[in-house]
Image (cartoon, helix red, strand yellow):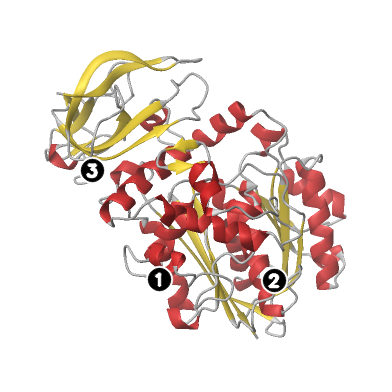
Amino acid sequence: MNESREPTVESDDAGQAFRCTNCSSSWYYTRGRCLDCGSSSFETYRLGPGRVVATTTVHATPPGVRTPNHLGLVRFDDGVSLIAQLESSGVSVGESVGFGEIVTLREGDATSIGPQLTTE
Amino acid sequence: MDVSITGVGMTRFESDAQASTLELAERVAWDALEDAEIDSSAVESVHVGNMAAEALDSRTGLENAVCGALGIEGATADRIENTSASGASALLRAVDAIRAGRSRTALVVGVETMSSVDTDTATDVISSLTHDREYVQGLTLPSFAGLAADAYLERYDADREALAAVAVKNHRNATVNPYAQFQKEVTLDEALKSPPVAEPLRLYDCCPTSDGAAAVVLTADGDGEVQLSAIEGATGSHAVAERADPLEIESVALAGERAMARASISHEDVDVACIHDAFTILELLELEELGFYDNGQAWRATLDGRTDRGGELPVNPGGGLKARGHPLGATGVSQVIELVWQLRGDAPGEGRQLDDPDVGLAINVAGFGNNSICTIVKRA
C-alpha cells in the first residue's frame, strides 16, 4: 500500500517544503516522487529562515496579484530554493528571511492564501 | 542528410496586425513557397509553431487550417507547442522529418496573435507556463528577469547602463528593418528613465507583445544557397529557483554546445547571432551561456560596441525580440530568417546587410530557460 501524501499545493502551505521519508532529500516545487531515490513517500515540513539571493519589485502584475509585487529568490537549508513574495520592499541581498503571516497571495477563481517572507 | 533553407516569408511584427492567426500564417506560407519557387502541392510536411492560438485567438487545428488555405493535400501536419520557443521547435521537427526521410519538402510556419485579448488575459496565459507554486506567487516572465538582472548587476558590479546598452543597440538595429515592430532609436537616457517593470528592469528592458508570422521552406538537398547545419534542443529546470545559480540557463548552454558540435564549428566561426532577448538581461546571460563571452563579460562587450552591426560579433542585427517584436510562436522562425537574409546577402532595409557572413547562430528560449533550441546555418 502506498502511504504517500498527494503533493498538491494547499492554499496555506507556501511556507512548507517536502522531505523524502526514504532518503531525506528535500524539495519545494511540488512533484510526485523524490528525484534522488524515486520514492513517492514524503512528508511536508515548515521552512526555517533562508538567505536572500536576489530581489525584484514588479510593477506590472497579473490580475489578482498586488501591485507592486515584491519578490525574493531565497535559499534555505537542505538545498531548497524558492521565489516568493516579500512582505515589504527594502529587503537586501544576504538578509535572513522567514515565512510570516498568512495573507492573500493571489485573488481570482482559485484564491491562494499563504505566508509571505519577512525579515526576522 | 543535407537540409537546405530554400524559401522564407515574414510579416512585419506589429502590436496589432488586424488579422487572425490563420490569416497571418497563410500569408507567410505563400510568401515562403513563392521565395522557394515551388507549388504548395510539393509540400510533404507542415510544422506549425504556435504557443496559444486556442487561448489568444479561439483557434484550434491551426496546422490543418493552414493546409486547407494553401491547398496542401496528403501532407503530414502538426502544431508544435513549446511556449516562446514553439517556432524553433517546429523547425527542429521539420529537420527531423527530412533527415528521417519522411519529408522531402517541409513548410515551417511560426505564428502568434496576441492583440485579440487584453493585456491581463495575455499575461495570465503566458504566466500559466510557470510551476503551480510559482504561479500562486504572481510570478510573471519579467519577474524572473528582474531577479536575474538584480543578481547579475550585483555579482559583476555593473549598473543599469549595462542592460540599457542592449536595448539601445537592438533598437538602433531595428530602425532600418522594415519587418520590425519598433523602427525608432532609443537613447541610453530614455531607456534608463523609462518606467520600472520588474526592478532593476525598465520598460525598455522588456520586449513587447506582438502579432506576427514567419515561414521557411526546407528541402532535402545540398544545393540550396543556405544550409541548415544543425538544430539541437535541450530542456532545463521548470521551476526557475531550482537552478544552482540564478545566472545559469543550462538549457541554453547545452543546446548551444550540441549544435556547435553537430555543425563542427567553434565560436570564432560564427559571424552573426540572433539571441532570445525577451529581456535585455537575457541577451547578456545567453551570450555567456553559449560561450561567446566569459561570465560577467557580455555587458562590457555590449557597452564597447563589440556586438554592434559592425562589431566582432553582430548580435540581433534585425532588432531582436526587443525591437523586432516577439509574437511568441513566430520568433524562433524569424530569427532564422534574419540569418538566411544575412547569409544570402539580401537583408531587406537600407544599410542593414552585414559584410559577407558565412555562419549564423540562433537561440530560441522557452519560458525563462525551460527549454532552448539552437540553430546553426551556413552559406553553401
Q: Which of the 4 image quarters holds residue B37?
A: bottom right
Above or below for B356 versus A65: below
Q: Residue drawn 86% across and 49% down? A: B69
Q: Residue at x 85, y 63 (%)?
A: B40
Q: Is residue A102 above or below residue A35?
A: above
Taking the image as shown, residue B33 lies to the left or right of residue A69, namely right
- Percent of width and height locating residue A74: 24, 37
- The residue indicated by pointer 3 is A38
Residue B292 position (above or below residue B190): below
Task: Give the residue type that dot 3 points to.
Answer: Gly
Q: Does dot 2 land on a helix, a strand or a loop?
A: loop
Q: Quadrant of the C terminus of chain B?
A: bottom right
Q: Which residue is under mark 2?
A: B352
What secondary structure is found at the residue carrying circle 1?
Answer: helix
Of labels 2 and 1, the one closer to you? 2
Q: Chain of mark 3?
A: A
> Do the residues at discs 3 and 1 belong to one chain?
no
Does mark 2 fall on the same chain as mark 3? no
Query: Could you say where residue A46 lies in the image, as x and y percent from the top left?
Result: 16, 24
Q: Marks 2 and 1: same chain?
A: yes
The crowding category of the residue bearing disc 2, from other C-alpha atoms within 10 Å (few below 14, some 14 to 19, many at least 20), is some
> Between residues A59 and B34, which one lies in front from this camera angle?
A59
Q: Tell me how far mark 3 sits from mark 1, CA to CA.
A: 29 Å
Task: Give the residue at mark 1.
Answer: B257
Residue placed most toward the observer, B182 or B303: B303
Residue visible at 57% across and 76% down in the picture: B310
Q: State whether residue A32 appears in this view.
A: no
Question: Nearer the observer, disc 3 or disc 1?
Answer: 1
| Element type where label 3 sits in the image | loop
Three-letter amino acid code at disc 2?
Arg
Q: Amino acid at mark 1?
A: Glu
Please rate how many residues cluster around mark 3, counting C-alpha atoms within 10 Å: few if below 14, some from 14 to 19, many from 20.
few
